Amino acid sequence: MIFVFLDRDGVINRRPLVKPYVTAPAELQLLPRVPEAIRLLNQAGCRVIVVTNQRGISMGLYDEHDLESIHWRMREELARGSAQLDAVYHCPHDADKCTCRKPGIGMFLRAQQDFPGLTFDRSIVIGDSVSDLQAAVRLCCRKALIGAPGNAADRELAAQHIIPDFYCESLWAAVTAFVLPGLRDLAPRIAPR
């Protein structure tokens, strides 16, 4: 089974323009073609898991109940496009206060506990930030960066000698040009008899 880990803000939904965080369900706006992309992953038999840092909770900008409502709205919007998520994990902590906040790998390890058979060598991380890809490197996952080569995140990653396996302008592009064509390479090898 192939697992695809998605960041939320900037990958699934638009980042807010006037403030740093989505704090209420009405503020959540899916990016173009996201339901279609996730539906393709579902149809290909991939497990789709969201892993999202939610520092705004520790800052008191919204609470766990608000986040639950936001994620309920996200799932509802995806379901309208016949797409579904297998799980959503979040880290509510401030930077350097835990091991679950990306680039930490705590959320991924929780997913591994919840999904027997999850192996990171057959997993893909799709994100738009440095911390997303740093986590992927720690887990030895394949990794796609939403954003153009040479953007700020890419320059910071290059300074750390982290090179994305794929650059894409959107989740749709990542799924159709990187994930789905590469599934055969990630499938477990069957030894000849």
Image: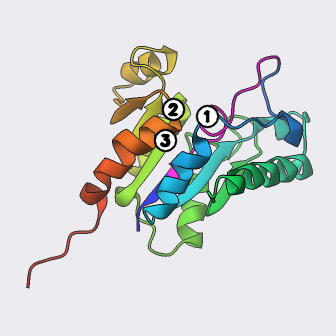
Q: Position of residue 93 (x, y in %)?
A: 76, 42
Q: CA distance from mark 3 to mark 1?
A: 16 Å
Label 1 residue SS: loop
Which-is-in-front pick, marks 2 and 1? 1
From this viewpoint, is residue 24 visible? no
Task: Identify the disc placed on residue 32.
Answer: 1
Identify the image quadrant of the C terminus.
bottom left
Lateral position of residue 134 relative to residue 187, left or right: right
Amino acid at circle 3: Ile
Q: Find the magenta span and give its range.
A: 5-18
In the rendering, which numbered label is found on residue 126? 3
> Residue 11 in magenta?
yes
- In the rendering, at what x and y percent does residue 164 appear? 36, 32
**Residue 170 has which mark?**
2
Comparing marks 3 and 1, which lies closer to the viewer?
A: 1
Badge 2 crowding class, 10 Å Cα cut-off, few under 14, some 14 to 19, many 20 or more, is many
Residue at 45% across, 66% down: 45
